[in-house]
Image (spheres, rainbow, N blue to C red):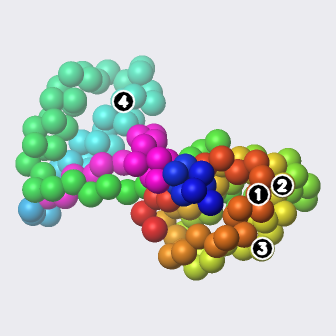
């Protein structure tokens, strides 16, 4: 249990940056709308390099607007290379990385304990308050990440 607790604390302290996103919060609606519009134009220009767009001017505009933010909100997304719970395969022994996300989860579903080769478990934006002792039965489990629970 001490090893699992250490891994849990370590993985929580070393949250992967790719799972989190910082969004600016503005003091007025006009700045918020201007930022979203500029961000959409910038993303479109990134996706379509053939557009006759000046990346430097778009980036500078985004930075000026971002500097007007009164604070930043952190949001977390499930890791894309983890298997979402909604897409569990029939053969649960093939699952090594699993993500449970969304507020509908108040406990870890029983089928998770059947994933005998599970090495990484990610709980993102769930309502799970307590990690059950049953996780100790997953002998391959090395890391449990809690993101915004």
- Left of 69 or right of it: where is 16? right
Q: Mark 1 to mark 2: distance in Å?
A: 6 Å
According to the picture, the residue beneath numbered tag 2 turns out to be 116
- Left of 119 or right of it: where is 2? left
Q: Residue at x 46, y 58 (%)?
A: 147
According to the picture, the residue beneath numbered tag 4 turns out to be 45
Q: Residue at x 45, y 30 (%)?
A: 47
Evaluate if marks 4 and 2 touch, with contact meaning CB atoms under 8 Å apart: no
Which circle, 1 or 3, is nearer the viewer?
1
Q: Mark 1 to mark 4: distance in Å?
A: 46 Å
Identify the image quadrant of the N terminus.
bottom right
According to the picture, the residue beneath numbered tag 3 turns out to be 110
According to the picture, the residue beneath numbered tag 1 turns out to be 138
Which image quadrant is residue 61 in? top left
Of callouts 1 and 3, the N-terminal one:
3
Of callouts 2 and 3, the N-terminal one:
3
Of 148 and 49, the residue lying toward us: 148
Of 52 and 98, the residue lying toward us: 98
Which circle, 1 or 2, is nearer the viewer?
1
Rendered view: 54 above or below 35: above
Q: Mark 2 to mark 3: distance in Å?
A: 12 Å
Of callouts 1 and 4, the N-terminal one:
4
Residue 83 lies within the magenta run: no
Q: Which residues are magenta?
A: 9-26
Secondary structure beneath label 1: loop
Image coords of residue 125 (percent x, y): 48, 66
How crowded pointer 4 is (Cα within 10 Å; few <14, some 14-19, many 20+) is rated as some
């Amino acid at each position: 249990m001490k090893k699992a607790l250490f891994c849990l604390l370590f993985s929580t302290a070393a949250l992967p940056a790719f799972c989190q996103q910082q969004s600016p919060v503005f003091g007025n609606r006009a700045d918020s709308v201007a930022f979203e519009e500029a961000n959409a134009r910038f993303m479109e220009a990134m996706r379509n390099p053939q557009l006759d767009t000046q990346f430097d001017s778009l980036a500078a505009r985004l930075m000026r607007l971002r500097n007007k933010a009164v604070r930043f909100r952190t949001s977390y997304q499930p890791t894309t290379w983890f298997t979402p719970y909604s897409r569990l395969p029939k053969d649960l022994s093939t699952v090594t990385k699993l993500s449970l996300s969304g507020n509908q989860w108040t406990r870890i579903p029983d089928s998770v304990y059947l994933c005998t080769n599970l090495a990484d478990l990610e709980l993102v934006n769930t309502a799970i308050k307590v990690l059950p002792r049953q996780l100790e039965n997953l002998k391959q489990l090395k890391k449990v990440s809690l993101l915004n629970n």
